Image (cartoon, rainbow, N blue to C red):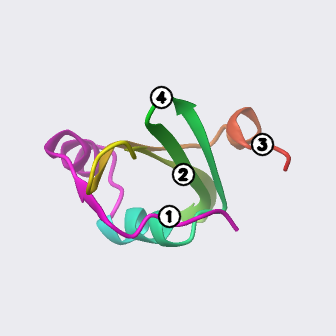
Amino acid sequence: MAAPVDNYEITAHARFEMVRRRIAESVVRGVLSAPQQRYPIGPGRDVLQSKSLFDDKIYLVRVFIDIDRTPAEVVTVYRTSQIARYWRAM
């Protein structure tokens, strides 16, 4: 399991996308507290991701977070069925 993020804020943009994409805050909190994978995607930004069940189908929930500030900021969130495209063998 990857390192969690405990101290964070969810930006207005991320909240908007969570509502639009029908991803509950509890799902985002779960990914942040116990991500299955975490890796950097740029200076000061990580993606945390975990597989999650939505409507009887497994999706990959990806949470993008700026870690170069305190508290860290959740930038955006989405889910994808293209798990193999983003899942990294560790």
Badge 4: residue crowd in 10 Å (few <14, some 14–19, many ≥20): few
Tell me the kind of residue under disc 2: Leu
Residue 7 placement: quadrant = bottom left
Badge 2: residue crowd in 10 Å (few <14, some 14–19, many ≥20): many
Q: Farthest residue to the right: give it.
A: 89
Residue sitting at x 50%, y 42%: 46
Tell me the kind of residue under disc 3: Arg
What residue did someone put label 3 on?
A: 88
Q: Which mark is residue 43?
A: 4
What residue did someone put label 2 on?
A: 48
In primary-sequence order, the first of circles 2 and 1 is 1
Q: Position of residue 78 (x, y in %)?
A: 43, 43
Badge 1: residue crowd in 10 Å (few <14, some 14–19, many ≥20): many
Tell me the kind of residue under disc 4: Pro
Q: CB of mark 4 within 8 Å of CB of mark 1?
A: no
C-alpha separation, residue under disc 1 versus residue under disc 3: 16 Å
| Residue situated in front as seen by the camera: 84 or 54 | 84
| Between marks 3 and 4 in the image, the one whose residue lies nearer the viewer | 4
Tell me the kind of residue under disc 1: Val
C-alpha separation, residue under disc 2 versus residue under disc 4: 15 Å
Residue segment shown in magenta: 1-24
In primary-sequence order, the first of circles 3 and 2 is 2
Q: Which mark is residue 31?
A: 1
In primary-sequence order, the first of circles 1 and 3 is 1
Residue sitting at x 85%, y 46%: 89
Q: CB of mark 2 within 8 Å of CB of mark 1?
A: yes
C-alpha separation, residue under disc 2 versus residue under disc 1: 7 Å
